[in-house]
Image (cartoon, rainbow, N blue to C red):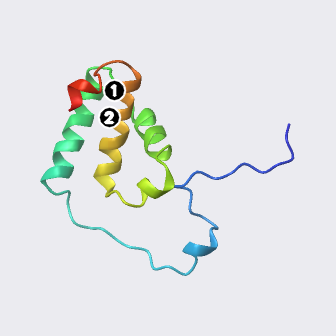
Amino acid sequence: MSDTPPTPAIHDMGGLSRFRCTPVERDEAPPDEFGKKVDALRQVLAQKGYMTVDELRRGIEAIPEGEYFSLTYYERWLTSITTLLLEKGVVTAEELR
């Protein structure tokens, strides 16, 4: 077992000094049309057995820091969904163009 503490993933912001004393943004608004479409896509893919919510989360957590902070909430979901479908060979890069 290593004595080196694990490096937190980019989504794990707890304790990072640059985020201390930053007001929490509360988004009480329902998803916009784009968000509804991405969530519907996620639901259909899950029902058909192409992905799980855990895989979606893993994909979101794997987005590089610079990209992560440039994306909206549902853009992160779509990025994760796309990556998962490519990894599993469900779609090809050419089919997504």
Residue situated furthest left in the rendering:
33
Within 10 Å of disc 2 (Cα), the crowding (few <14, some 14-19, many 20+) is some
The residue positioned 54% from the left and 55% from the top of the image is 10
Q: Position of residue 43 (x, y in %)?
A: 25, 34
The amino acid on which the numbered mark 2 sits, given as a three-letter code, is Thr
Q: How many marks?
A: 2
In the image, residue 43 sits, relative to residue 72, either above or below, namely above
Q: Is residue 87 left or right of residue 14?
A: left
Task: Name the quadrant of the C terminus.
Answer: top left
Q: Is residue 5 above or below residue 22?
A: above
Q: Position of residue 59 (x, y in %)?
A: 44, 39
- Calculate the distance from the C-alpha at mark 1 to the C-alpha at mark 2: 5 Å
Q: How many other residues sit within 10 Å of disc 1, few (<14), some (14-19) or many (≥20)?
A: some
Image-based side of 95 in relation to 55, left or right: left
Q: Position of residue 27 (x, y in %)?
A: 30, 68
> Which residue is labeled 2 in the image?
82
Residue 94 location, quadrant: top left
What amino acid is labelled 1 in the image? Leu
Q: Are marks 1 and 2 in contact (CB under 8 Å)?
A: yes
User: Which residue occupies the foreground of this view, 24 or 61?
Assistant: 61
Residue name at image x 32 percent, y 34 percent? 82
Instruction: Give SS at disc 1.
Output: helix
90 to the left or right of 6: left
**Where is residue 54 shown, x and y percent of the image?**
45, 35
Residue 51 visible in rendering: no
Position of the N terminus by quadrant:
top right
The answer to whether 61 is drawn above or below residue 45 in the figure is below
| Residue placed under numbered mark 1 in the picture | 85
Q: Say if 23 sits above or below 93 in the image.
A: below
